[in-house]
Structures are given as structure tokens and as C-alpha cells.
Image (tube, helix red, strand yellow):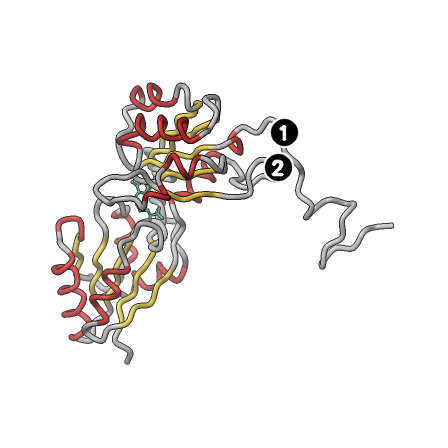
Amino acid sequence: MTRKVIIVGAGPGDPELITLKGKKAIEEADIIVYAGSLVNREILKYNKKNAKIYNSATMDLEEIVKVMVEGVEKGLKVVRLHTGDPSIYGAIKEQIDELKKYNIDVEIIPGVTSLSAAASSLKVELTLPKVSQTVIITRPEGRTPMPERENLRELAKHGSTMAIFLGVSMIDKVVSQLIEGGYRRDTPVAVVYKASWKEEKIVRGTLEDIVPKVKEANIRKTALIIVGDVLDPKDYDYSKLYDKDFETEYRKRKL
Ligand code: SAH
């Protein structure tokens, strides 16, 4: 048997927004280490084996790795449950590297990122022809330093759609940097708190007025800041994909 830990993307919150494969891994797990600050505990109920459950929010890296290694050494099925999709701010690389030292591999099952959940709640397409064809996923500098070329002011210069994680607690700073970087003050912004959870809240505005609105709604964490004209486009092009005057590999023009 391969010695491995399965890293599962738990999705954004709604327990139905997990892949079938991720759910199956949870059902069959003997040990689950879950990111307790954000993963919805309802998801743990899928487990059918009375698994031993650990909340990684109260553990350090060494403790997390120890639990996983000991589980694998005993031949148990170990699942590491991360919020959203593990590849985005998941801190998985360090765990993968630590596990490697014990000759333990990982399998990663992707999840629905909170960005997808937020876009769905907003009912928007993040990439509209003529408006923006690019989404920048980023965060403001916190305890984790940002490479200088990636500070929000630099990224704002592109005027693309931007999805800002881990930033709502410093939304004033975020907004001023975006404006300094070149976004118009009337650029639409949406802040989505706990996308896909029952407690979900959406605050909409512009760079000009979003800060007081977010303060008023008392949103201080677990929110995404989405910026860009795709939220409220004045003018956009219909795609070429379904344009009757264009042919695609799958659809020929009707004569
Ligand atoms: N891997 C996760 C992100 C982890 S970083 C993902 O793919 O979604 C944690 C940050 O993600 C939070 O500070 C917040 O900005 C965002 N986040 C996570 N879940 C969220 C949700 N349900 N709604 C809005 N933002 C969320």
C-alpha cells in the first residue's frame, strides 16, 4: 500500500459543495485533521468510521505532521481537510515537504474555492469580453510579506478583475492602495462574507463608499473583496463562442 495522506478541499462552506471524491475520502477516513477556523463542521459528519478528529487551528505544523505520520505508520487512512481549494492560501506545501521526510506521499483532491462560491452568489462572470479577461487572485500584506512587485498598488495598474483574500480586516488600506494604483473611485466592489454559508452576507458598492458599508455590516473576517467592472459592466461584448456569425470546431454556420 502506498503511504499517503489525502489532502481534501472541503469547499467554501455549504456541505454540498464538496466533490464526490472528497466526500468519499472523508467517509472512509480513520483520522481527519481539519482546518477548524474555516471548514464547516457539518462536513465531518460524512465520516462513517468514527474517525479520530483533530482541529488544526489549535495545532502547530510539527503537531499536525506528527498526527498524520503516526496515522500513516499505523496503516490508517488519514485525511487533511482544507477550506475551499487547497492550492489557494492553503499552506499545504510545507506539509507535503514535511511528510516527504517520512517517505509519505500526498494525494490532493481539489475543492470549490470561496472565489467560485462568491462569484456564484454574486451571479457574475469574472471574465467579460472587452471588460476584463484576467482575474488576479491576491491578498494584502499582513504577517506574510508580499513580494514588492506584487503589492496591491502594482497589481491595480492592470485594472483587471481582482479577488482579494484575507483582506477585509484592513479594507481601508486595501481600498486606498487600489485607488493609488489606478482604479477609478467608482469601480464596483463587492464584499462577500461567508459565501455559501447560511450566514452569507453581500455588501456592494464602489471603491468610494465600500469601507463604511463594510464597517456598518460589521464584517471583519472570512470575506472576499472582489473588484472590477465585471460586477457592473456599462458595456461588454457578447462572446464569440455562441455568436451565430462565427464558426467553432463544434458548430458550423447555418446557411
Ligand atoms: N483555500 C481557501 C482560502 C483560504 S485563505 C479557498 O480556496 O477559498 C482564507 C481566506 O479565504 C479568508 O480570509 C477569506 O478571505 C477567504 N474565504 C474562505 N472561505 C470563505 C467564504 N466562504 N466566503 C468568503 N471568503 C472566504
On screen, residue 93 versus residue 178, left or right, reads left
| 79, 243: nearer the viewer | 243
Mark 2 sits near ligand 1, with its Cβ under 8 Å away = no
x and y percentages locating residue 38 in the rendered image: 26, 44
Element under disc 1:
loop
Q: What is the C-alpha distance between the residues marked 1 and 2?
A: 8 Å
Q: Mark 2 Cα within 10 Å, few/some/many (few <14, many 20+)?
A: few
Task: Find out if the beta carbon at label 1 lies less than 8 Å from the nearest ligand 1 atom.
Answer: no
Q: Are marks 1 and 2 in contact (CB under 8 Å)?
A: yes
Give the x, y percent position of residue 145.
25, 44
In the image shown, does 245 or 116 lie closer to the viewer? 245
Q: Which residue is mark 1?
A: 235
Q: Nearer the viewer, residue 115 or 178?
A: 178
Residue located farthest toward the right when viewing the structure as drawn: 255
Quarter of the image where one finds residue 13: top left
In this rendering, position of residue 218 left or right of residue 19 = left
Where residue 67 sits: x, y (%)?
14, 64
Nearest the eye: 122 or 26: 122
Packing grade of label 1 (10 A; few <14, some 14-19, many >=20) is few
Q: Residue 27: where, in percent of width, then height? A: 30, 62
Residue beneath the point at 13% across and 49% down: 58
157 to the left or right of 1: right
Looking at the rendered structure, the number of numbered marks drawn on it comes to 2
Quadrant the N terminus occupies = bottom left
The kind of residue on which mark 1 rests is Asp
> First in sequence: mark 1 or mark 2?
2
The answer to which quarter of the image holds residue 129 is top right
Kind of element beneath mark 2: loop
| Label at residue 130 | 2
Residue at 52% from the left image edge and 36% from the top image edge: 124
Q: Quadrant of ligand 1?
A: top left
Extreme-front residue of the structure: 148
